């Protein structure tokens, strides 16, 4: 099993070893690499820019003057596979401080060697050339270590015996002397040249004034001649203008008359179109709506007529259907009642007198209950009777009408039952 390792663009990943005992190294910059557990070795080396400040104290130049030089160098590890391999061989496993120390010692050694071959004036007056020389000499050595020198500049050059200061004072005095001489010579030459220029200026001025006077006279003569010609041309132009204006005015008037004629024709055409439009508008706004309204009223009347006819037909159909349904219902009820009566009659014929009597006796309590129902709400009844009282007569009449009522309700004639004949017999009633 293994693991995936990633690295940014400011570092290089070095994977050593692999499966089957291989010792091949893999370099990866800004990407990822696969490493086997317990087999592969993972190391990193920085690719960031490293700033170094090499310094050589009291180094004697070619003339034996001891000076101190400080510089600033920017270096980094190169990313080409072969050069990166050189850098890994030299610095892999070391810290940035250790890498800087090695490169710094190399640069200081070359800087010290180059200082011994140059004079103070060469170093002081042309620092850029001195820095380029150091860089060219040191680049091959640091390159074999996989290091690239991006830049190298001289920061400061000084000494303890004030040689540079004296050299500067001498140079300053010489420059000041040359400057004073140059100023005096320049002022002298300037005065001579100024006088010559003034003379030339006056000569040129006089010559220019003369030429200006001649030019002015000729200008005035030319102006007079030009004014005469201009006035003549103006008069001719004015007359020609007035004549042409009259002609143009006449043409304009003719054009205006033609325009008025065309406008009148257009106006007549427009009025005719307006009359046609008005007629069409009246037809559209008055006649057509009236015809549409009449047609609408006609259609509405026809619709109302058809509606009433259909409603009447529907009502008649409804009445007919209701009549047929009621007739069918009455017919069915009549048939049912007739069948009921027929069945009752057949049953009564099959029953004997005793059965009929039993049926009557069973029905009597129900009849009595219905008759006595109003009396159930009566607390007491007091019958007053005297001579000539009609109470007895009413009771007898009720008893006499009872068989008739039962016959009407049930179809059973109680007068033909022997027991009831005795009860309704007037003699028995008198005895009672």
Image (cartoon, rainbow, N blue to C red):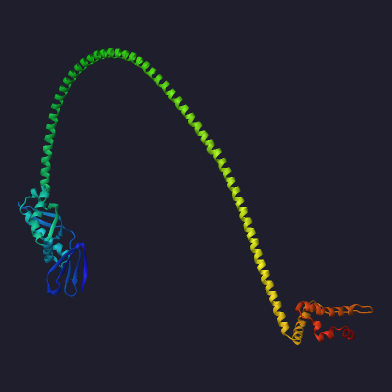
Q: In percent of the image, x 76 and y 87: which residue is there?
A: 354
Rendering quarter of residue 345: bottom right
Image coordinates of residue 361 in percent, x first then y, are: 77, 84
- The quarter of the displayed image where residue 18 is located: bottom left
Q: How many labels does the image show?
A: 0
Q: Which of 122 and 218 is in front in this view?
A: 218
Looking at the picture, how far across and down is residue 382, in whole percent? Answer: 87, 79
Q: Is 51 situated above or below 286? A: below
**Left or right: where 339 falls relative to 180:** right
Give percent across and percent down for residue 58: 10, 56
Q: In this view, does 359 lie to the left or right of 211?
A: right
Q: Quadrant of residue 5?
A: bottom left
Quadrant holding the N terminus: bottom left
Seen in the picture, residue 307 relative to 205 is either above or below; the reply is below
Q: Which residue is rendered at x = 48% and y = 31% of the image?
A: 273
Residue sitting at x 39%, y 17%: 250
- Residue 333 x %, y %: 68, 72
Q: Which residue lies furthest to the right in this view?
A: 387
Between 223 and 407, the one nearer to me in the picture: 407
The residue nearer to you, when weighing 402 against 147, is 402
- Looking at the rendered image, the quarter that the C terminus falls into is bottom right
């Amino acid at each position: 099993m293994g693991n995936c390792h990633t690295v940014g663009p400011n570092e290089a990943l070095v994977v050593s070893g692999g499966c089957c005992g291989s010792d091949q190294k893999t370099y990866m910059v800004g990407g990822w690499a696969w490493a086997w557990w317990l087999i592969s070795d993972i190391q990193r080396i920085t690719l960031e820019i490293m700033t170094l400040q090499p310094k050589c104290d009291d180094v004697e130049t070619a003339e034996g003057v001891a000076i101190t030089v400080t510089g600033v160098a920017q270096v980094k590890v190169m990313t080409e596979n072969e050069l990166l391999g050189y850098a890994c061989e030299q610095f892999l496993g070391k810290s940035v401080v250790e890498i800087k120390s090695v490169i710094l010692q190399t640069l200081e050694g070359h800087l010290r060697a180059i200082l011994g071959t140059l004079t103070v004036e060469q170093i002081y007056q042309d620092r850029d050339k001195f820095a380029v020389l150091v860089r060219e000499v040191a680049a091959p050595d640091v390159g074999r270590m996989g290091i690239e020198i991006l830049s190298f500049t001289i920061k400061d050059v000084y000494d303890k015996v004030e040689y540079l200061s004296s050299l500067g004072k001498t140079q300053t005095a010489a420059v000041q002397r040359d400057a004073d001489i140059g100023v005096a010579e320049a002022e002298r030459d300037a005065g001579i040249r100024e006088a010559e220029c003034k003379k030339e200026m006056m000569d040129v001025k006089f010559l220019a004034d003369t030429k200006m006077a001649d030019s002015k006279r000729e200008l005035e003569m030319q102006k007079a001649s030009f004014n005469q010609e201009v006035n003549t041309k103006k008069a001719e132009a004015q007359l020609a203008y007035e004549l042409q204006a009259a002609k143009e005015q006449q043409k304009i008037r003719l054009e205006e008359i033609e325009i008025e004629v065309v406008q009148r024709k257009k106006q007549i055409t427009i009025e005719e179109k307006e009359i046609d439009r008005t007629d069409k508008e009246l037809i559209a706004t008055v006649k057509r709506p009236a015809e549409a309204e009449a047609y609408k009223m006609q259609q509405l009347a026809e619709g109302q007529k058809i509606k009433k006819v259909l409603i009447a037909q529907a009502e008649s159909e409804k009445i007919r259907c209701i009549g047929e349904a009621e007739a069918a219902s009455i017919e069915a009820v009549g048939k049912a009642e007739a069948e009921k009566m027929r069945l009752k009659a057949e049953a009564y014929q099959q029953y004997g007198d005793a059965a009929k009597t039993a049926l009557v006796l069973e029905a009597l309590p129900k009849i009595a209950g219905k008759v006595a129902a109003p009396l159930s709400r009566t607390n007491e009844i007091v019958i007053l009777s005297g001579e000539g009282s009609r109470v007895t007569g009413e009771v007898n009449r009720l008893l006499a009408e009872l068989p008739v009522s039962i016959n009407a309700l049930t179809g059973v004639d109680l007068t033909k039952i022997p027991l009831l004949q005795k009860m309704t017999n007037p003699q028995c009633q008198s005895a009672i």
